[in-house]
Image (cartoon, rainbow, N blue to C red):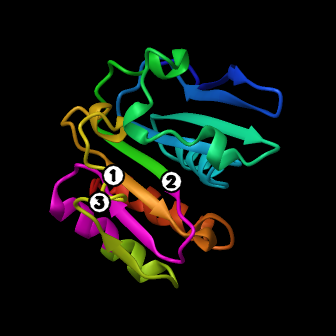
Amino acid sequence: MDRPRITTRPWQTTATGHVTELLYDDGETDDTLVCALHGGAVEPGTAEAALELATRLPDATCWARLGYDDNGAFAAWHPPSKEVRPADHPLLAQVAGRGFDTVLSLHGRAEEEAVVGGAADAGTKQSVQRRLDDALPVPVRTAADGPYGGVHPENPVNWLAADDGGIQLELAPSTRDEHAATVREALVELVTDGTV
């Protein structure tokens, strides 16, 4: 197995901003994929957290989409997750057919609450929720539908997973900043002990 490498690729540029793809990958692992679909200034801290998590896990890949814009990155570069497709993102296309055992997708939200979603089974989501709730000073809940559910089959967190069900984490501002290390360590434990 080759050593993982970081590859970046400009995706789109406008007069006021740009989006770049990032891939941390060894070219073959299908164990764990950590994603940040709305990184950069769109949902700050998510891409950094995803890359840091992937580098701390054995046999992990990270794919992130980083958006920046002088007039507001969220408005310019935040498509619905189900609209992020490998046909439009060449670095994502490189890992799209692997069927990862574990897929974690990190997102940000404005409220001081974390939400565990994705199409993973309810028991797995509840285990993640309990572990994070024990570790964090913000409330953590699960979602099975709605805007933070992450259950749509076209959401990359699900179709990138071998069993069509990953874990989508909607992280509060503090959990992407002063409590980011706590989130990372909890997720490392959840992956390495086989919970996710």
Q: Quadrant of residue 175?
A: bottom right
Q: Are marks 3 and 1 in contact (CB under 8 Å)?
A: no
Give the residue at mark 1.
167
SS under mark 3:
loop
Q: Looking at the image, is mark 1 or mark 2 earlier in the sequence? A: 2
Distance between mark 2 and mark 3 Cα atoms: 15 Å
| Number of numbered callouts drawn | 3
Q: Is residue 156 left or right of residue 49?
A: left
Q: Amino acid at mark 3?
A: Gly
Residue 34: x %, y % from top left = 47, 42
Q: In the shown orientation, is residue 183 left or right of residue 51? A: left
| Foreground pick, 42 / 192 | 42
152 above or below 126? above
Looking at the image, is mark 3 or mark 1 earlier in the sequence? 3
**Dot 3, how many residues are within 10 Å of its Cα: few (below 14), some (14-19), or many (20+)?**
few
Q: Which mark is residue 146?
A: 3
Residue identifier under label 2: 107
Mark 3 or mark 1: which is in front?
Answer: 3
Q: Return the residue nearer the eye: 34 or 68.
A: 68
Residue 45 against residue 63 in the figure, above or below: below
Q: Residue at x 45, y 66 (%)?
A: 186
- Magenta residues, as a range? 107-129
Q: Residue at x 50, y 53 (%)?
A: 107
Image coords of residue 71 (percent x, y): 78, 46
Q: Is residue 129 visible?
A: yes
Identity of the amino acid at label 1? Ile
Element type at marker 2? strand
Q: Looking at the picture, how far across and down is residue 90, in whole percent?
A: 53, 15
Point out which mark residue 113 bears: none
Residue 1: within the magenta?
no
Hey, what amino acid is under mark 2? His
